[in-house]
Image: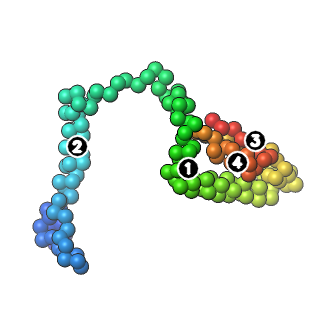
Amino acid sequence: SILRIQHKVFSGKNMTTNNNSKKQSSVSTPTLVVLTIVVIPLMGYVLHQLGILSSAPPPPPDFGSGSMFDQIATRYDMINRVLALRMDVGWRKQMTGLLRDRLLSTTTTGESDPEETTATMPLRIVDLATGTADVALQLARDIPTATIVGI
């Protein structure tokens, strides 16, 4: 019945072969669960208590202030372009172009004055976590009438 089938599946008994006649993994699901939930965190705790994982120095006082990013910002864009094979430039242009088209294609705002369009309204766009401001700068090029704020 179903209980016996589940037992066979989870215990690894009667392993079947696929079309290529290769055996499936003999590690059972309960074993993987025990390893994931119990053994790995326990190993981390033991290694931490032994001082093997706790040798990292504490973070500097300005941790989280952006000072680390300030140190790499001049190289960040170049490294990003090289690693992404300049595809990031295309993605960014596509994203800002779609945003521009969507914002400027709306005919009415739904407000009391149906004659006012988004093309004539002042647009304010906030770029959260702006980093080196690549998106904000591209938005400024694509939507020159908008006010772009990078945070």
In this rendering, the count of numbered labels is: 4
Front of the two marks 3 and 1 = 1
From the image, tell me which residue sits under label 2: 40
Indicate the amino acid at tag 3. Answer: Thr
Callout 2 environment at 10 Å: few (<14), some (14 to 19), or many (20+)? few
| Residue 19: image location, x then y, percent | 24, 79
Q: Quadrant of the C terminus?
A: top right
Which circle's residue, 3 or 1, is located before the other in the chain?
1
Q: Quick check: 93 left or right of 45?
A: right
> Which residue is located at x 87 percent, y 54 percent?
115
Identified at 72% across, 41% down, the residue is 148
| Residue identifier under label 1 | 81
Q: Secondary structure at mark 2?
A: helix
User: What secondary structure is found at the residue carrying circle 1?
Assistant: helix
- For label 3, the crowd category at 10 Å Cα-Cα, with few meaning under 14, some 14 to 19 and many 20 or more, is some
Label 2 and label 1: CA atoms lie apart by 37 Å
Q: Nearer the viewer, mark 4 or mark 2?
A: 4
Quarter of the image for residue 3 reads bottom left
Q: CA distance from mark 4 to mark 2?
A: 46 Å
Q: Which residue is mark 3?
A: 147
Q: Which residue is mark 4?
A: 139
